Image: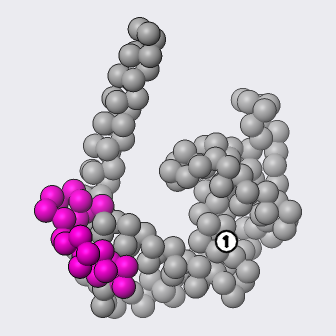
Amino acid sequence: MLSKWYTTAMKSTGKPNDPLGRFALSIFWINGLLLRNGDRLTRSIGQSSARWQVLGRVGYQPQTVAQIARDMGHARQSVQRVADVLAKEGLVVYRENLANRRSPLLELTPHGADILRTIYSLNEEWTRHMMTKLNPEQLDVVADALEEIAHIMEADEQQISQHETRKEERL
């Protein structure tokens, strides 16, 4: 069943004529579904998708708020707000960053690691459920295509940024 937003958007504007437009709308739709599902999964333990994303990043390795924001494509301020709440709750701590003293590293606490393990356990149940309805080979193909598109878009973004920087330097 299509979400109300998606079907409303398609009725009011029509299906995009270009493949990139349709792709973008589909990504927005699935992103919303993933975030809502993450919120549903984590609600019982007082967490959210936003918190899960930050915990997951620092569970991998300590990082600065700026690194997390850049990697996730979020505003630094929004990640900072989530990180501060997680720190206040004792799930993460700020540690000195020898590479940049003005930008501390965010690190998972033992309590934060326990919460993250619980989230991953809840997610495993949902994954098992969803995989009874999805084709693993098809998901791999889609994931490969998404990664390729992401690399193309990142390279294009970098090229545009460099061009704009050179243009500003000439002014």
**What x and y, as percent, mark residue 31?**
42, 69
As drawn, is 97 to the left or to the right of 70? right
* Picture residue at 59% right of the left edge, 49% below the top: 75
The magenta-colored residue range is: 3-24
Q: Quadrant of residue 83?
A: bottom right
Q: Residues within 10 Å of mark 1 (few under 14, many from 20)?
A: many
Amino acid type at mark 1: Leu
What's the magenta bit mostly, secondary-structure-wise?
helix
Q: Is residue 149 visible?
A: yes
* Picture residue at 82% right of the left edge, 45% below the top: 95
As drawn, is 102 to the left or to the right of 58? right
Of residues 82 and 129, the one nearer the viewer is: 82
Q: Is residue 154 above or below residue 46?
A: above
Of residues 152 and 3, the one nearer the viewer is: 3
Q: Is residue 155 magenta?
A: no
**What x and y, as percent, mark residue 156?**
31, 36
